[in-house]
Image (tube, helix red, strand yellow):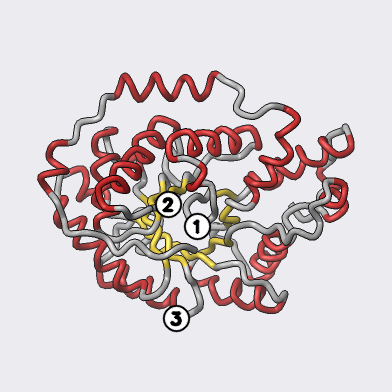
Amino acid sequence: MSARNGGTELDLSWISKIQVNQPAVLRRAEQIQARRTVKKEWQAAWLLKAVTFIDLTTLSGDDTSSNIQRLCYKAKYPIREDLLKSLNMHDKGLTTAAVCVYPARVCDAVKALKASGCTIPVASVATGFPAGQTHLKTRLEEIRLAVEDGATEIDVVINRTLVLTGQWEALYDEIRQFRKACGEAHLKTILATGELGSLTNVYKASMIAMMAGSDFIKTSTGKETVNATFPVAIVMLRAIRDFFWKTGNKVGFKPAGGIRNAKDSLAWLSLVKEELGNEWLTPELFRIGASTLLLDIERQIYHHVTGRYAAYHDLPMS
């Protein structure tokens, strides 16, 4: 991953001036959804590119070491080798960007990837995921333990109460402490945008998170009623752009929750390309949090190569 965002001093005067034009954002979101994002002959190439942005995720109560091992195998070999050979991509080292698990499963993921000789990063959720409603001391310790176990990326959740009550300084201070607890690990801050009340709050929370040193800002935990949506993404991407223009620091973007099919993934790539440019279309600055998306991408690649859709038993590791 790229150099970390060191953050800036808290600038409340900037935050106080922010007001999002919601009708304009909704019109832009409708434009994205209405058009075809990638021409058919280029879709396979873009879908393979999408694979490299996926944080392949399992965050279930019944996770075990065996299904973590399976997840890691799929992260290393995301597309069947015979399909990659047909596209002349079998020797390109195609993998997902990372695997993402609960803190208690980090050791299992690190062990499985090490055994396969793979350097894919292990990301861990933390800080009382998904609600963030535990004591700050506990949340900080959870980060430290995940890093000790080998996680090199930490996906933290913010305390939504601080946003809803306008406690921006307290939010900044908490995220600064998360940043410090991460040590050398990269900090991805989940805003849980479906619970922030307004697009203006989404922009303000995005900006506070970046000022506090987040390397990525992420839409959702995947556990909220409303997860990654285009209006929210537009606001977050423009906050990233404004922060870059003001500070020179590039911060990554990660939509997560509800991104399940290949067509959706192409729309997300197109949106990031249009709003931030090609330089953000790298795993260092763009991720997609997903658990089932990879299956549909592999099915679309299968169809591109063979002319027919795969039965589920044709892709047994998905």
Task: Determine the residue positioned at 58% across, 62% down.
Answer: 99
Q: Which amino acid type is shown beneath numbered disc 3?
A: Glu
Side of 13 relative to 47 (left or right):
left
Look at mark 2 in the image and give the residue it sits on: 252
Crowding near the residue tagged with mark 3, few <14, some 14–19, many ≥20 C-alpha atoms within 10 Å: few
- 145 or 86, which is in the foreground? 86
Q: Are marks 2 and 1 in contact (CB under 8 Å)?
A: yes
Give the side of residue 43 with respect to residue 196, left or right: right
Residue 226: quarter of image: top left
> SS class of the residue under badge 1?
loop
Figure check: 56 above or below 314: below
Earlier sequence position, callout 2 versus callout 1: 2
Residue under pointer 3: 148
Give the SS element for disc 3.
helix
Alpha-carbon distance for marks 2 and 3? 24 Å
Depth check: give the residue in front, 259 or 22. Answer: 22
Examine the rendered structure and indicate whether residue 166 appears above or below residue 249.
Answer: above
